[in-house]
Image: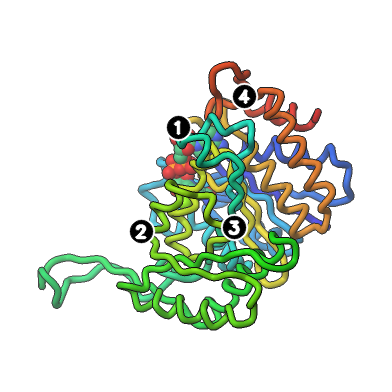
Amino acid sequence: MKIAILPGDGIGTEIVAEAVKVLKVLDLSFEMEEAKVGGAAYEAHGHPLPESTLKLAQAADAVLFGAVGDWKYDTLDRPLRPEQAILGLRKHLGLFANFRPAICYEQLVGASSLKPELIAGLDILIIRELTGDIYFGQPRGRRTAVDGHFPGAEEAFDTMRYSRPEIERIAHVAFQAARKRAGGKGGKVTSVDKANVLETFQFWKDVVTAVHAEYPDVALDHMYVDNAAMQLVKAPKNFDVIVTGNMFGDILSDEASMLTGSIGMLPSASLNAKNQGLYEPSHGSAPDIAGKGVANPLATILSAAMMLRFSLQQPEAADRIESAVKSVLASGYRTPDIWSEGTQKVGAREMGDAVVTA
Ligand code: NAI
Ligand code: MG
């Protein structure tokens, strides 16, 4: 088994180093090979996703990714910006299913901005479609308007689109995940759409409903995205599995991260049809705290656990990591993003060391 290690930019390098330390102490037989990606790759090779990095990722059984991006690259042409690297990896590896579990660890109930009773025991899963929707739809661009409210004015446009097979495969993933979480039978999927105003999402709703016929034991409900945004902070525990498109999933999963205490706690897995996966924290490169050694490495360490479970068939090792994280939190270690009165403030490296020891 081979893991491609792509730390990227900003805090990416700091947090991936901690996850690699944790992987090494497990003493499993896999190879790890590191490559540059994002701004770091642009500096070294003139491109955010060099051919060599893409080849390494394609040949690997799994990719552990940090984060890419920095404000200093904002003036580059879009194809050269660091963020293109992650979009390119998703596209070239066919990573269409993004899993973002939002779990509130007992020890962090107080770190969330929400009332403890709302989030204690929270364990929901957001499944975001990753390769379609308005992020990839063509045509897109800028032009002079020929109609609309201001004919003759400069305007910009994007295209929202989904095909039936794209929706079907993500719906299957969601129903199967719900079943698995329920122990093999049952569970609930909430499909989030905007069917009331968008044709793309009326189609989404119709296709998900059709796929549901194959999963009679799993409950299905539909919710508009604006209501879902509200319900996530009103009664998040009413959800089980949420499945939605690329853009709604992007936004709702950041919102859900706050239920867990910090975006620094939220891991993610992006899988393709061959169970090859890319594993990364849900956050970005955090340029505001990069280089200070204070980033929370737990989202990345928990992403490594998801990698062991989903792509490397090492569920026991994944369990070991997750229970080590729980015990480190129970001992009171906190990076600043999850710190509260009476706990011990530590940096990224001390947090990683504590997980290794545990
Ligand atoms: P961000 O997620 O990097 O940061 C948002 C806020 O959360 C910041 O205040 C940051 O300090 C904090 N934060 C994030 N991760 C943290 C951690 N592990 N521990 C403690 N605090 C943490 O999002 P932002 O600021 O919108 O974007 C920064 C850069 O990252 C941009 O260039 C953006 O394009 C890029 N980005 C990259 C992603 C990726 O590589 N997959 C995803 C999201 C953003
Ligand atoms: Mg996002």
Q: Earlier in the sequence, mark 1 or mark 3?
A: 3
Disc 1 marks a residue whose amino acid type is Asp
Chosen colour scheme: rainbow
Q: CA distance from mark 1 to mark 4?
A: 15 Å
Q: Earlier in the sequence, mark 3 or mark 4?
A: 3
Q: Earlier in the sequence, mark 2 or mark 4?
A: 2
| Residue 47 visible in the current orientation | no
Q: Which mark is residue 288?
A: 1
> Which callout, 1 or 2, points to the residue nearer the camera?
2
Q: Are marks 3 and 4 in contact (CB under 8 Å)?
A: no
* Helix, strand or loop status at disc 3: loop
Task: From the viewer's perspective, tell me whether residue 109 is left or right of residue 287.
Answer: right
Q: Are marks 1 and 3 in contact (CB under 8 Å)?
A: no
Say which residue label 3 marks.
50
Q: Is residue 204 above or below residue 63?
A: below
Say which residue label 4 marks.
347
Disc 3 marks a residue whose amino acid type is Pro
Disc 2 marks a residue whose amino acid type is Asp
Q: State the image coordinates of residue 95 (x, y, percent, origin top left).
A: 61, 66
Which quarter shows the N terminus? bottom right
> Which callout, 2 or 4, points to the residue nearer the camera?
2
